[in-house]
Image (tube, rainbow, N blue to C red):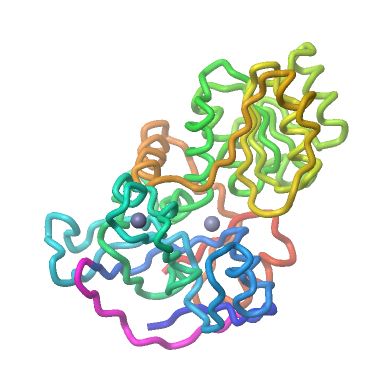
Amino acid sequence: MRGAVFLGDRKVELRNFPDPTPGPGEVVIAMKASGMCGSDLKFYRSPPGEAQKALGLGGNAEPFIAGHEPCGVVVARGPGVSAREAPEGLRVMDHHYAGCGTCPHCRVGWSQLCRAGITVYGVTAHGGHADYLKVPVRTLVELPEQLSFAEGAAVACGTGTAFSALRRMKLCGGDTLAVFGQGPVGLSATVLGAAMGARVIAIETNAERRKLAMDFGADKVLDGDQVQKQLLEITKGQGVDFSLECSSAPAARQAAVRCVKTWGTACFVGEGGEVTLDVSPDLLRRQVTLIGSWTFSAMGMLECARFIADHKIKLEKIFSHRWKLEQAAEAYQSFDTQSTGKGVFLL
Ligand SMILES: [Zn+2]
Ligand SMILES: [Zn+2]
């Protein structure tokens, strides 16, 4: 089979690999869609293995097949996997982490929190930018029939991350939500937040993304200039109920904390980097809750997919680029230089 690997320093290569054979407890998925994610750019741009090491995932200089937003159909089962668990042809997303499988985190579907060390498909093991993907059966999540494979790929990372963060914050209908950054995660938060009944104010410096945010149901879109002041004006001096920070920019993180009202909640989902807060005025004196949220559980992913199906959200339009696997090098070069949209490989 074919698989796209990051060689580091912006080199991508389509290589031939043996077709995977499922071992005990494993299945093989024929890939139908494999999303491209902002976090892939770290692996794409860095010297071989460096970005994985920086994320605490152990540096392995041997390149794995990239892609951690896999969606496809079950084509083979290993020993011990029943047809009931994974019938052939089942449309599935993959919760792209595997832990020990037995600790409390793994048992409740939060395998990425496993302390025994985790496998991240597409990062520390072969991922979805390939014809086939071999994973433990317990990582599969059924894709609702209303969702396309590409939409499933989006749910498998960025959109699921946005959904899980909004649930963690306990967003309610009628609340005001400020979403900082309108990349794929921020745009997902905008469309999901609006569908949950919140009034969404999207903040984004890029004009193209600001337009997308309006299409995704934002009530107002700000360009980031004097954003705290503007948010205070919009909320009659109170501040917003909730803010979600998806950009990782230190100034946006600060604004996301400072723009919430007294008793408000801010949540960070953007990876990496730093923030400086003045703890007493920014947090304590206003009873602010600050949440750090990393992706989602396997069942959280299913809940997200069902929500999208039930609310008839047209998630397809989150994709600006659709690629063939043989275009992998071109696809990542384009993503690297004009990263305003989300790409997906369709197989
Ligand atoms: Zn991702
Ligand atoms: Zn575990």
Residue 9, quarter of picture: bottom right
**Left or right of residue 136, residue 234 in this image:** right
User: Where, quadrant-wise, is the N terminus in this rendering?
Assistant: bottom left
Residue 224, quarter of picture: top right
Relative depth, front residue between 319 and 112: 112
Relative depth, front residue between 219 and 251: 251
- Residue at the limit of the structure toward the top, as seen here: 236
For the point 64% across and 21% down, which residue is it? 264
User: Where, quadrant-wise, is the C terminus in this rendering?
Assistant: bottom left
Per the image, is 23 magenta?
yes
For the point 56% across and 75% down, which residue is it? 59
Name the spot of residue 248 as percent of width and height, x first.
71, 48
Name the spot of residue 180 as percent of width and height, x first.
70, 38
Q: Is residue 240 above or below residue 30?
A: above
Q: How many marks?
A: 0
For the point 43% across and 88% down, which residue is it? 16
Name the spot of residue 317 as percent of width and height, x first.
55, 47
Q: Main secondary structure of the magenta part?
A: loop
**Left or right of residue 319, residue 179 in this image:** right
Q: Is residue 341 above or below residue 25?
A: above
Q: Is residue 11 above or below residue 337?
A: below
For the point 75% across and 41% down, which residue is it? 204
Give the image quadrant in which the ligand numbered 2 is located: bottom left
Name the spot of residue 95 as percent of width and height, x first.
38, 55
Residues shaded magenta: 12-25
Per the image, is 169 magenta?
no
